[in-house]
Image: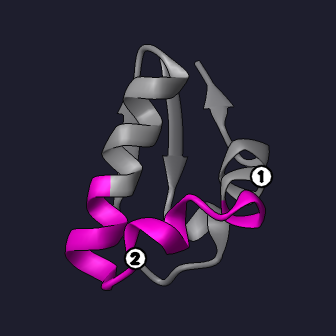
Amino acid sequence: MLSVSCRDVGVDCDFVGKGETEKELMDQLVDHAIKDHGYTREDVFKPEMQEKIKAHINKS
């Protein structure tokens, strides 16, 4: 299981995304960021944002 929390990437939010694959996890995080934090698709797909998220992926 892979996971990343909003707090892991510096956002004051208790959401934790989880997925069996990186794609599943990233899809969940993108949807959450747009719906709950007001980001645009362009924001979340910027290379620096993707790198920040991927650097904080936890494996369990």
Name the side, left or right, on which 53 lies relative to 55.
Answer: left
The amino acid on which the numbered mark 2 sits, given as a three-letter code, is Cys
25 falls in the magenta region: no
Mark 2 highlights which residue?
A: 13
Depth check: give the residue in front, 16 or 31.
31
- Where is residue 15? Give x, y as percent: 34, 61
- Where is residue 58? Give x, y as percent: 65, 34
Q: Is residue 9 above or below residue 12?
A: above
Q: Which quadrant would residue 30 be assigned to in this image?
A: bottom left
Element on which disc 1 rests: helix
Residues shaded magenta? 31-49
Q: Quadrant of the C terminus?
A: top right
Mark 1 highlights which residue?
A: 51
The residue lying at 65 percent from left, 67 percent from top is 9
The amino acid on which the numbered mark 1 sits, given as a three-letter code, is Glu
- Where is residue 18? Give x, y as percent: 39, 33
Element on which disc 2 rests: loop
Label whose residue precedes the other's in the sequence (1 or 2):
2
- Where is residue 56? Give x, y as percent: 72, 48
Name the side, left or right, on which 55 lies relative to 40.
Answer: right
Q: Which quadrant would residue 7 be assigned to in this image?
A: bottom right
32 falls in the magenta region: yes
Q: Is residue 12 above or below residue 5?
A: below
Q: How many marks?
A: 2
The residue lying at 51 percent from left, 36 percent from top is 3
Q: Is residue 19 above or below residue 43?
A: above
Contact, mark 1 vs mark 2 (Cβ under 8 Å): no
* Mark 1 closeness class: few <14, some 14–19, many ≥20 residues within 10 Å: few
Name the side, left or right, on which 5 lies relative to 8.
Answer: left
